[in-house]
Amino acid sequence: MSLKNLFDPAQVAELKQRLANLRPESERQWGKMNAPQALEHCSRGFEMA
């Protein structure tokens, strides 16, 4: 998987769709966090930036 470029509208649309498909009961695909924990983890990085 290559790094997504958030200046590319098509990649932004893909990312938004993937986030919209997340549900609290979504099965994790890697790691130990569930969907709500992963979103919280990612948003902390944006807050710090």
Image (cartoon, rainbow, N blue to C red):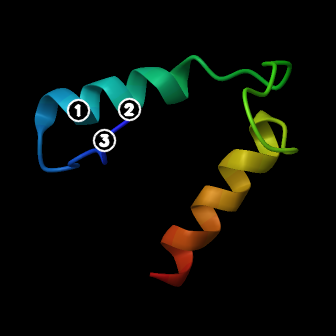
The Cα atoms of the two marked residues, 3 and 1, are separated by 11 Å
Q: Viewer-proximal residue, 31 or 47?
A: 31
N-terminal of the pair, mark 2 or mark 3, is 3
- Mark 2 lies on residue: 15
- Amino acid carrying label 1: it is Gln
Q: From the viewer's perspective, is the residue at label 2 or at label 3 nearer? A: 3
* Residue at position x 52%, y 29% in the image: 19
Instruction: Give how far apart the Cα atoms at labels 2 and 3 are.
Output: 13 Å
Give residue 38's mark.
Answer: none
Please rate how many residues cluster around mark 1, counting C-alpha atoms within 10 Å: few if below 14, some from 14 to 19, many from 20.
few
Q: In this view of the protein, which residue sits in the foreground, 38 or 2?
A: 2
Q: Quadrant for the N terminus, please.
A: top left
Horizontal placement of 25 versus 12: left or right? right
Task: Quadrant for residue 10, please give it.
Answer: top left
Judged left or right of residue 3, residue 23 is: right
Q: Residue at x 49, y 69 (%)?
A: 46
Q: Earlier in the sequence, mark 3 or mark 1?
A: 3
Mark 1 in CB contact with mark 2 (< 8 angstroms)? yes
Q: Are marks 2 and 3 in contact (CB under 8 Å)?
A: no
Kind of residue at disc 2: Leu
Q: Is residue 49 above or below residue 32?
A: below
Secondary structure at numbered mark 3: loop
Q: Which mark is residue 2?
A: 3
Q: Residue 18's spot in the image, x, y percent?
A: 48, 23
Question: Residue 26's quadrant in the figure?
Answer: top right
The picture places residue 7, in percent across and down from the top left corner, at 13, 50
Q: Residue at x 42, y 20 (%)?
A: 17
Residue that mark 1 sits on: 11
